Image (cartoon, grey):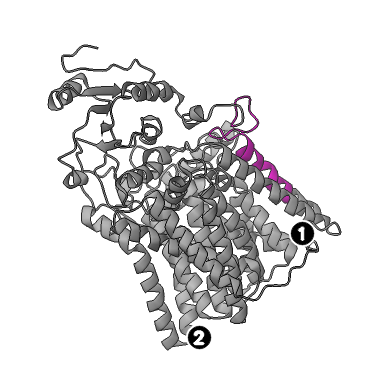
Amino acid sequence: MFPIILLLSLLLLIFITRDLLTKANIYRNLIQATLLAVVIWGLWLVIFTETLSLIHQITFYYVLSGWVIMTAMLAGYAYFLPRPQLNLRWPAWVLPLNNRVLAHLQATLIFIMLMSGVIALISPPNNWDSMTYHLTRVMHWLQNHTLQPYTTHELRQLYQNPFAEMVILHLVLLKGDDQFVNLVQWFSMVGSLFGTYWIAQQLHANFTTATLASLITSTIPMGILQSVTTQNDYLFSFWFVCFVSFILATQDNPHWLNKLGVAGSLALAILTKGTSYILIFPFLIWLIILLFKRNTSKAIRTVIFIGLVVLTINLGHYQRNLAVFNSPIKPAANPYSHDEYSNEEMSPTLLISNIVRNLSLHLSTPSQTINGFLQDSVKSFHNLLQVDINDPKTTWVATPFTIAKFNIFEDASGNLVHLILIGFTWLWVIRQRNSTHLIYMACISSSFLLFAFVLKWQLWHSRLHLPLFVVSTPLMALWLAEIQAKKLQNFIIILLVTQALPFLLINPSHPVVTTRNIFNQPRLGQYFIPRPMLEKSYLEIAQATQSCSQIGLVAPYDTWEYPFWLLLPKTADFHLEAIDVNNMTQILTDSSFEPCAIICLECSIEQQRNYAKQYSRKLTIPLTDQKEVPIYLQTVDGRK
């Protein structure tokens, strides 16, 4: 259980940050200290990982030694700190029997947290993007003992922001398998629940209203689905929450610890997900205005400090992308890119089109009649605008607009109830005219508008909207608490919880209460739940390559590569490497690599024979993943 040292180091950091905040007279609650500790912990993890990468020593003993040394230093520092007085009495505000509303809110919140935690811990990762690049890049890093680029058929393994996978890297290395990898997003959800609680308090909410903010956050359908995957949307949401909370803390007191929280969370948000540049920008402008209104000279120093922290933490990733793609963020326009993420053209009508289509992603209902009406309405609206609803200049390739029937899917499910509540919250914020609330909601709206302005519409944008839904919940709770009709208030709360349960319990990728569920199905089979037809083929390939440790891979874009790392024999000299690469990573090809087997996915017979000739005595294994087909082992002379 070596990964426990990661949690132990974090707990010690919380103890230390609490003391630092107390001595600075800016300590508000344990959540503030916890968020600051997590930010510092994340910064350390990045610096530690990048250092090991430079010397090609991302290995078990180096990683374990680094964490042991850090934990020992933290323990030594904490030992000399004054011991806080322990109050063994049950806190009056935790499940209070004299406040049934607060007790019910907290009990429901605890149920959702614990159930999603059980799912994340028991069920294996099987998300599509995780199979193609999130987890696959981790396996390549472990194999190469460095974060440096490598040849690959899937460029997203290289240029996508890597922080989530850095954390997974440490978990896999210390645990020896992927048992804990889903917990990165689950802990991000838990952190976001506490973070939104604190933001609500900073906006002057009482205990009950702040708890309501956490509950609303916990019931976001896309949030529930993301919390049990190895993607990075909830991790980014968590850093977003930290960033916003430390902006509010800096507004209250511009102490260097709060500024460190701002700088660190911004740096880690950027290192986690590319959409951070877009979604965080309005909040960053808000922060800069706050700083300059208080003191211009200090503001300049603070902005420089934030910039240096962001650059330092992201420098390794920028440098690696520049070396391969001539861009610090992503490949520039080139013949190897699948498509461009950014809009190729923009105008007021096209912006309105993107806004409407992005909002429409959250409108799916169980009724196909209603969905058809909504889809026809959106199309009619586009006809009035005289805009092509599937304009390729503003639409991701091969993704025509549709409002599909309601489904539970971690890449595309919507947040209909929460979207409606945000609309009512907007009206309430405008009517009550609280300046902080207005600025806060204006920043959220600006982030969404900027998102629609910059990025092409995609069918799976709903998960990229998750951070905006999460940071909206404190204001939603404040509005809901103001409702005078208690029956209406209770109805909305019950509706939020009820609509969340299917996403928690009958998620097709991680089912809990269905006949075939995560408790009664073999772990290996659960990896293939989204694509069960592949399991037999992958197992046959693994069996066919038992005697080979140097394996070449030829695969098309968006291929499930991670199952090969799970199933192929792990000998001391095992090596899996992409060959015959036709993209910008050709320059990284290792000419000395001589595979004894080649896994060739969706290859023609002619390609198979060519590889057999090129690599004498080698096997070429074709796999077609469109349907279940026999697998043939093609030898040099063509015999099956």
In the rendered image, residue 410 lying in the magenta stretch gets the answer: no
Residue range corresponding to the magenta coloring: 492-518
Image height of 396 relative to 199, above or below: above
Q: Which numbered dot is residue 294?
A: 2
State left or right for residue 86 relative to residue 293. Answer: right
Q: Residue at the spot x=42%, y=56% of the render?
A: 272
Q: Secondary structure at mark 1?
A: loop
Q: Nearer the viewer, mark 2 or mark 1?
A: 1
Q: Is residue 421 left or right of residue 324?
A: right
| Residue identified by numbered label 1 | 94
Of the image marks 2 and 1, the number of the one nearer the N terminus: 1
Question: In terms of depth relative to the viewer, which is nearer, 51 or 391?
Answer: 51
**Residue at position x 78%, y 56% from top?**
95
Q: Amino acid at mark 1?
A: Val
Query: Which is more toward the observer, 345 or 463?
Result: 463
Residue 539: percent from the left, percent from the top?
39, 23
Magenta stretch contains residue 498: yes
Q: Quadrant of residue 513?
A: top right
| Residue at (78% x, 62% y) in the render | 93
Q: Quadrant of the C terminus?
A: top left
**Could one spot residue 348 in this view of the protein?**
no
Q: Say which amino acid is labelled 2.
A: Arg
Residue plotted at (66% across, 68% down): 201
Q: Position of residue 339 (x, y in %)?
A: 29, 44
Rounded to the nearest angstrom, the CA distance separating label 2 from label 1 is 38 Å
Of residue 47 and residue 400, the one placed in the foreground of this image is 47
Please state if 130 lies on the left or on the right of 391 as rendered: right
Crowding at mark 2 (Cα within 10 Å: few <14, some 14-19, many 20+): few
